């Protein structure tokens, strides 16, 4: 997977991405990251990329031309037109299913805005997807881009050490993850559930599935509407409602 990020703050992207799991994946050649500084494509001698908005209003707007030139510098080197994700609170809300969809791509381009936004004309010209990570406003698109790249990277072969890790993360089957425990067996009077010490693999897996179902029902019941539930899952939830 190759990520290309159009940004005014390339160091922020590089520093955030080239650490931990994604950093190791870059070193292994499983991921690659290119940051493109939009300011390098400014059309004026002061390297400004913003101007006052037509119609008045507070703040500044990023100009179309430097953004378009930055994008074209990437697109010219690709064999096909890429998906271009514009980080925007007005976009479709990012979730695990979108991460799985994006993980099928070979190249992804992220456009990170700042100030009061980007000239609408260039968005119409180059953006294929407007994406939000939640109903709130951030200073710029860099943090959302990092969030999405991290979520997508985890789904790619070889990025995680344990091949099963991504499969059993939160939101697998659109359910929240079951509770996790480690040593010591007892901590400040709280004990690890006995079933996890039983060594009975099938019972442990059943307990984890049930805990996942209960946690989702209690914390994110909206997810159950689209969760991949078996008949056994449905019977368990129906019985749990009566308790």
Image: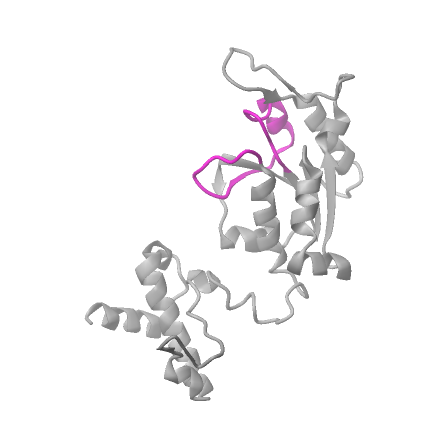
Residue occupying the far top of the picture:
55
- Position of 125 relative to 219 (above/below): above
Q: Position of residue 4 (x, y in %)?
A: 71, 43
Using the image, determine if residue 222 lies above or below residue 71.
Answer: below
In the displayed structure, does residue 145 sit left or right of residue 177?
right
- Colour scheme of the picture: one colour
Q: Main secondary structure of the magenta part?
A: loop
Residue extending furthest toward the left: 242
Residue at 73% from the left image edge and 28% from the top image edge: 39
Residue 141 in the image, given as x and y percentages of width and height: 58, 37
State the image quarter where residue 177 is shown. Answer: bottom left
Find residue 226 and report its image quarter: bottom left
Relative to the observer, which residue lies in front, 23 or 85? Answer: 23
| Residue positioned 46% across, 88% down in the render | 199
> What residue is at 76 percent from the left and 62 percent from the top?
28
Q: Quadrant of residue 79?
A: top right
Q: Is residue 214 rendered magenta in the image?
A: no
| Image quarter (top left, top right, bottom left or bottom right) of the C terminus | bottom left
Check the image and report above or below for 50 versus 135. above
For the residue pair 206 and 11, the one nearer the viewer reads as 11
Say whether residue 116 is left or right of residue 14.
left
Magenta region: 111-140
The residue under the point 70% across, 22% down is: 65
């Amino acid at each position: 997977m190759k990520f290309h990020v159009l940004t005014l703050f390339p160091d922020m992207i590089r520093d955030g991405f080239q650490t931990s799991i994604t950093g190791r994946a870059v070193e292994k050649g499983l991921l690659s990251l290119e940051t493109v500084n939009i300011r390098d494509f400014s059309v004026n001698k002061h390297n400004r990329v913003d101007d006052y908005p037509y119609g008045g209003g507070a703040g500044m707007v990023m100009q179309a031309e430097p953004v378009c030139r930055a994008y074209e510098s990437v697109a010219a080197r690709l064999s096909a037109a890429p998906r271009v994700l514009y980080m925007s609170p007005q976009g479709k809300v990012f979730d695990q299913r979108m991460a799985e969809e994006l993980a099928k791509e070979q190249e992804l381009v992220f456009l990170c805005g700042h100030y009061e936004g980007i000239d609408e004309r260039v968005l119409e010209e180059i953006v294929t997807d407007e994406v939000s990570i939640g109903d709130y406003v951030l200073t710029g698109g860099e943090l959302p881009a990092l969030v999405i790249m991290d979520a997508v990277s985890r789904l790619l072969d070889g990025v995680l050490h344990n091949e099963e890790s991504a499969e059993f993360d939160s939101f697998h089957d659109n359910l929240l993850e079951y509770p996790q425990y480690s040593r010591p067996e007892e901590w400040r009077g709280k004990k690890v559930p006995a079933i996890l010490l039983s060594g009975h693999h099938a019972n442990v897996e059943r307990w984890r599935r049930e805990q996942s179902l209960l946690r989702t029902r209690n914390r994110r019941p909206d997810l159950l509407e689209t969760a991949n539930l078996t008949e056994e899952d449905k019977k368990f939830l129906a019985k749990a409602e009566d308790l």
